Image (spheres, grey):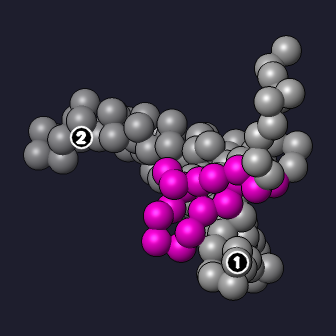
Protein backbone atom coordinates (compact mmCIF):
# COMPACT_ATOMS: atom_id res chain seq x y z
CA UNK A 1 0.00 0.00 0.00
CA UNK A 2 2.87 2.35 0.75
CA UNK A 3 4.27 1.73 -2.75
CA UNK A 4 0.87 2.65 -4.20
CA UNK A 5 0.60 5.88 -2.19
CA UNK A 6 4.11 7.02 -3.16
CA UNK A 7 3.77 6.09 -6.83
CA UNK A 8 0.24 7.50 -7.08
CA UNK A 9 1.42 10.85 -5.73
CA UNK A 10 4.29 10.90 -8.20
CA UNK A 11 2.08 9.92 -11.14
CA UNK A 12 -0.49 12.57 -10.20
CA UNK A 13 2.20 15.26 -10.07
CA UNK A 14 3.65 14.21 -13.43
CA UNK A 15 0.17 14.21 -15.02
CA UNK A 16 -0.30 17.77 -13.75
CA UNK A 17 3.09 18.77 -15.15
CA UNK A 18 2.36 17.11 -18.49
CA UNK A 19 -0.96 18.95 -18.77
CA UNK A 20 0.84 22.22 -18.04
CA UNK A 21 3.42 21.59 -20.75
CA UNK A 22 0.70 20.76 -23.25
CA UNK A 23 -1.16 24.00 -22.43
CA UNK A 24 1.98 26.06 -23.07
CA UNK A 25 2.06 25.06 -26.70
CA UNK A 26 -1.17 23.74 -28.19
CA UNK A 27 -0.57 21.60 -31.28
CA UNK A 28 -1.99 24.26 -33.63
CA UNK A 29 0.75 26.81 -32.77
CA UNK A 30 3.58 25.23 -34.69
CA UNK A 31 6.66 23.34 -33.44
CA UNK A 32 6.53 22.31 -29.82
CA UNK A 33 9.74 23.17 -27.94
CA UNK A 34 8.66 20.82 -25.14
CA UNK A 35 7.94 17.83 -27.42
CA UNK A 36 10.88 15.69 -26.25
CA UNK A 37 10.20 16.38 -22.58
CA UNK A 38 6.49 15.69 -23.06
CA UNK A 39 7.20 12.39 -24.82
CA UNK A 40 9.66 11.31 -22.12
CA UNK A 41 7.22 12.19 -19.33
CA UNK A 42 4.39 10.40 -21.15
CA UNK A 43 6.46 7.23 -21.69
CA UNK A 44 7.55 7.11 -18.04
CA UNK A 45 4.01 7.91 -16.93
CA UNK A 46 2.58 5.04 -18.97
CA UNK A 47 5.07 2.62 -17.37
CA UNK A 48 4.27 3.83 -13.86
CA UNK A 49 0.50 3.68 -14.45
CA UNK A 50 1.02 0.05 -15.48
CA UNK A 51 3.02 -0.53 -12.27
CA UNK A 52 0.16 1.00 -10.25
CA UNK A 53 -2.34 -1.26 -11.98
CA UNK A 54 -0.12 -4.22 -11.12
CA UNK A 55 -0.02 -3.24 -7.44
CA UNK A 56 -3.82 -2.89 -7.37
CA UNK A 57 -4.21 -6.26 -9.10
CA UNK A 58 -1.89 -7.83 -6.53
CA UNK A 59 -4.07 -6.51 -3.70
CA UNK A 60 -7.19 -7.69 -5.48
CA UNK A 61 -5.76 -11.19 -5.87
CA UNK A 62 -5.59 -11.51 -2.08
CA UNK A 63 -9.08 -10.05 -1.58
CA UNK A 64 -8.14 -6.47 -0.68
CA UNK A 65 -9.90 -3.51 -2.31
CA UNK A 66 -8.03 -0.25 -2.75
CA UNK A 67 -10.38 2.60 -1.82
CA UNK A 68 -8.11 5.66 -1.82
CA UNK A 69 -4.71 5.50 -3.51
CA UNK A 70 -3.69 8.94 -2.24
CA UNK A 71 -4.34 8.16 1.43
CA UNK A 72 -3.67 4.41 1.32
CA UNK A 73 -7.13 3.25 2.39
CA UNK A 74 -7.99 -0.41 1.79
CA UNK A 75 -10.94 -2.66 2.61
CA UNK A 76 -10.95 -6.35 3.52
CA UNK A 77 -14.20 -8.34 3.08
CA UNK A 78 -15.60 -9.86 6.27
CA UNK A 79 -18.84 -10.80 8.03
CA UNK A 80 -20.23 -8.70 10.88
CA UNK A 81 -23.18 -10.25 12.71
CA UNK A 82 -23.70 -12.56 9.73
CA UNK A 83 -23.82 -9.68 7.21
CA UNK A 84 -21.28 -8.87 4.51
CA UNK A 85 -19.08 -5.97 5.53
CA UNK A 86 -15.57 -4.60 5.19
CA UNK A 87 -12.75 -4.13 7.63
CA UNK A 88 -10.97 -0.90 6.70
CA UNK A 89 -7.39 0.14 7.24
CA UNK A 90 -5.33 3.17 6.29
CA UNK A 91 -1.60 3.39 5.77
CA UNK A 92 0.00 4.50 9.02
CA UNK A 93 -2.48 2.74 11.29
CA UNK A 94 -0.87 0.08 13.45
CA UNK A 95 -3.87 -2.27 13.25
CA UNK A 96 -7.30 -2.66 11.72
CA UNK A 97 -9.62 -0.62 13.93
CA UNK A 98 -12.76 0.04 11.85
CA UNK A 99 -15.40 -1.67 9.77
CA UNK A 100 -18.30 -0.56 7.58
CA UNK A 101 -21.22 -2.10 5.78
CA UNK A 102 -21.05 -2.82 2.09
CA UNK A 103 -23.62 -0.15 1.26
CA UNK A 104 -22.33 2.74 3.37
CA UNK A 105 -18.66 2.90 2.45
CA UNK A 106 -15.77 4.35 4.42
CA UNK A 107 -17.80 7.41 5.45
CA UNK A 108 -19.94 5.10 7.59
CA UNK A 109 -17.06 3.33 9.30
CA UNK A 110 -17.47 2.21 12.88
CA UNK A 111 -14.92 1.12 15.49
CA UNK A 112 -14.37 -2.62 15.82
CA UNK A 113 -14.16 -2.29 19.59
CA UNK A 114 -16.41 0.02 21.58
CA UNK A 115 -14.58 2.92 23.24
CA UNK A 116 -14.51 2.92 27.00
CA UNK A 117 -14.57 5.88 29.38
CA UNK A 118 -10.88 5.30 30.05
CA UNK A 119 -9.84 5.94 26.44
CA UNK A 120 -8.10 9.24 25.94
CA UNK A 121 -5.62 10.84 23.60
CA UNK A 122 -2.29 11.67 25.18
At which x and y percent is residue 47?
62, 62
Secondary structure of residue under mark 1: loop
Q: Residue furthest left?
A: 28
Q: Is residue 3 visible?
A: no
**Residue in the picture at 25% in, 30% down:** 24
Mark-to-mark CA distance, 1 and 2: 64 Å
At which x and y percent is residue 107?
49, 51
Residue 60 figure quarter: bottom right
**Residue in the picture at 80% in, 30% down:** 117
Name the residue tied to disc 1.
81
Query: Along the line of sight, which residue is nearer the eye, 1 or 106?
Result: 106
Compared with residue 24, is residue 27 higher up or lower down, i.e. above or below? below
Residue 1 figure quarter: bottom right
**Residue in the picture at 80% in, 20% down:** 121
Q: Which residues are magenta?
A: 96-112
Q: Which mark is residue 11?
A: none
Name the residue tied to disc 2.
31
Amino acid sequence: VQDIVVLYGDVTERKRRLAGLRKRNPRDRGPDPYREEVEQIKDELDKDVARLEGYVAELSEIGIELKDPAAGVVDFPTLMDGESAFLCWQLGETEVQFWHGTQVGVAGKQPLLPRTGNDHVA
